[in-house]
Each structure stands twice: as structure tokens, then as C-alpha cells.
Amino acid sequence: MAWLWQRDIDDEKRTPHIIVKLRGRLAHRGFRTRRAEKELSGMGLRKGMRILDFGCGSGIYTIAAARVVGEKGVVHAVDLHPTILEMVENRARENGLKNIDIIYSDLETGLRRGSVDIVLLYGVLKSFGRRRELLFEAHRIMKKKGTLLVRQPGMKEDRIKELVLKDGFFRFSGKHGRILKFSRIEGKFHEI
């Protein structure tokens, strides 16, 4: 039965391989991706932008963002689960999207400082143990007028704000439905 299990990058957690595949198939019903496209467009994503989707999961928002930013834009999909990234890559190919960059990691992106317009943290803030490092990396790779979009089901808005604003990397700049929007604060922060 070992084939049922897929090791994560850190070898500490195990997720049933079949569950990962099933989640991916269920998540990619066409209406969910179209709804995600509409949502992302409403949050400021435009043609030609560079987006980073931390903890991309099944890739609904990765695929949606890739469609919104178009051929001249790029979406970096970061996840620590190789099966998930393989599914996202396959979905991109099925949809004819060539503007998705897959990054196999739990934190470090390898992207240049100041190279990304918008960072998506959808569903990762609650479970991510190294939040400060995550927010620092998001801040590091964002352009001066970059935006952080956070959506965290099961966490109160005040708690999300508290976690994101705690270290002074970002300021709250509004919300749209359940998505909180933060702007990057310019400053020199010590490497973590």
C-alpha cells in the first residue's frame, strides 16, 4: 500500500496520494475556475503582471491568474507537494497555458527581489508554521507597490490582520468579500 502515500518535501507529513489526486479532480470544475478569474480581476490582477501563488494547492487560482495575466504575464505556483505541482502542470498543459512557473518549495522561491506584482496567500496562513519567514519572503519578492492578497477560511479577519501586520512588512489597504488586501511597506528589514 506504499503507493497510496506521497511524501511531502520535508518528509514529516504524509498525505494519501489518492486523496491529493481526488481533491485536484474535484477542485477543477469549470465554474470554480471562472469564478476565481472574476474574483482575481476584481482584486487588481491585469494583463502582463507577475503573480506568485504560495501554497497553490489544486491550482484553481494559479490557472485563473494565468488566464487573467495572459501570455505576457507569469504566475509562479509554489507548493511543497510534488503530486499537486504535477497536477497543476498537467492542468496548465490541458488549458494551453505556458505562463505558469512551477516552484517546488515550502518557502524560498528563488525569485529576484522586487520582481512580483501580487502575492496570493490563499488558505496557507493558518497552517504555515513559519509565518514571519513567509511574509518576509513575500515582501522581499514584491515590487515597491506590490500587493498581498490573503484569504483564510476558518480564521477571523482581525486575526489575519494581526498576523500580517505584526512585523511591519505590510499595511492593510481594504477587502473584497473574504479577501483581505495589504500593501507593501518600503523599508529595510533584516534577513530572516
Image (tube, rainbow, N blue to C red):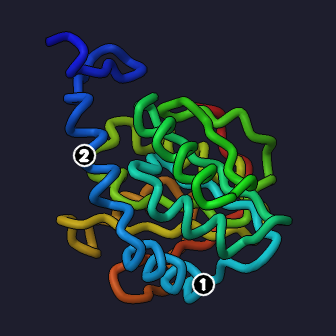
**Looking at the image, is mark 1 or mark 2 nearer the viewer?**
2
Neighbour class for label 2 at 10 Å: few (<14), some, many (≥20)? few
Q: Which mark is residue 22?
A: 2
Q: Which mark is residue 174?
A: none
- Residue at position x 67%, y 56% in the image: 75
Q: Nearer the viewer, residue 182 or 61?
A: 61
Q: Is residue 7 above or below residue 105?
A: above
Type of amino acid at the residue the image marks with label 2: Leu
- Residue at position x 42%, y 57% in the image: 166
Q: Secondary structure at mark 1?
A: helix
Q: Position of residue 70 (x, y in %)?
A: 76, 70
Residue ranking furthest to the left: 1
Q: Earlier in the sequence, mark 1 or mark 2?
A: 2
Q: Is residue 127 above or below residue 9?
A: below
Q: Quadrant of residue 192?
A: top right
Q: Is residue 7 above or below residue 170?
A: above
Q: Is residue 2 above or below residue 15?
A: above
In the image, taking residue 188 as reference, residue 57 lies left or right, namely: left
Q: Position of residue 150 (x, y in %)?
A: 43, 67
Q: Which residue bears the numbered disc 1?
A: 41
| Disc 1/disc 2 C-alpha distance (Å) | 28 Å
Regarding residue 157, the answer to whether it shows in the image is yes
Residue ranking furthest to the top: 2
- Residue at position x 69%, y 58% in the image: 97
In the image, taking residue 63 as reference, residue 145 lies left or right, namely: right
Q: Secondary structure at mark 2?
A: helix
Give the quarter of the figure containing the N terminus: top left
Q: Position of residue 127 (x, y in %)?
A: 27, 45
